Image (cartoon, rainbow, N blue to C red):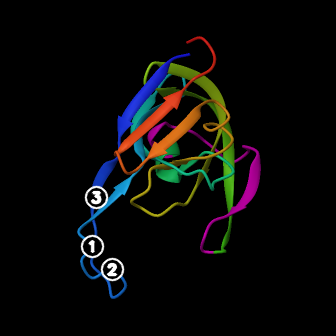
Amino acid sequence: MPTLRFRYVRIPATPSEAFPHAAWYHRPLIPVTLSTGQKSSRLLTLIDSGADNTIFNMQVAAMLGLRLGNAPADSFCGTSGQEQTARYRRLAIRVGAVSYQAMVGFAELPFDVAGILGQDGFFDRFAVTLDQARGLIILKHPRPV
């Protein structure tokens, strides 16, 4: 069972009324490579256990040269409560030394989010440990690489 280890990424925080002394956020962001066979893109992507699917920003689809007009669609809803539509394609995904194929959605995400690794397409492939106290992300892949 291959084990991959990553460190949490430290991102500057903007102090607020609720958190006036906040200086940093620590986020479970890991590098992921998406490939179409002809083009690939390496992205820093958020691990999100609350997301049903793995979804990337529509700008990533453009970088990969994907045309999504006839791609299968599905609706999803984030914490904002706003329903959105994602268009899906099966792509090659590489996380560390582990490569696999999965359905990946593309939608309009906030500009600072390249992608979200959700239950389908990520958590169904790895046993995931998020240890923020130690700043450590541990992924165990149960299948041979």
Magenta highlight on residue 73: yes
Q: Is residue 135 left or right of residue 140?
A: left
Circle 1 Cα neighbour tier, 10 Å, few/some/many (<14 / 14–19 / ≥20): few
Secondary structure under the numbered disc 2 in the rendered image: loop
Which amino acid is tagged 1? Ala
* Nearer-N-terminus badge (2/3): 3
Which amino acid is tagged 2? Phe
Tell me the residue at 55%/37% (across/down): 128
Q: Which corner quadrant holds the N terminus?
A: top right
Q: In this figure, which residue is indicated by the disc labeled 3?
A: 11
User: Foreground mark, 2 or 3?
Assistant: 2
The percent position of residue 80, horizontal first and vertical second, equals 60, 74
Of all residues shown, which one is farthest toward the front? 133
Circle 2 Cα neighbour tier, 10 Å, few/some/many (<14 / 14–19 / ≥20): few
Above or below, comparing residue 29 to residue 5 in the picture: below
Secondary structure under the numbered disc 3 in the rendered image: strand
Above or below, comparing residue 24 to residue 94 in the picture: below
Q: In this figure, which residue is indicated by the disc labeled 2?
A: 19
- The region drawn magenta spans 62-80
Above or below, comparing residue 92 to residue 31 in the picture: above
Q: Is 34 or 139 nearer to us in this picture?
A: 139
Of all residues shown, which one is farthest toward the top? 144
Q: In this figure, which residue is indicated by the disc labeled 1?
A: 22
Q: Do the residues labelled 1 and 2 touch (CB within 8 Å)?
A: yes
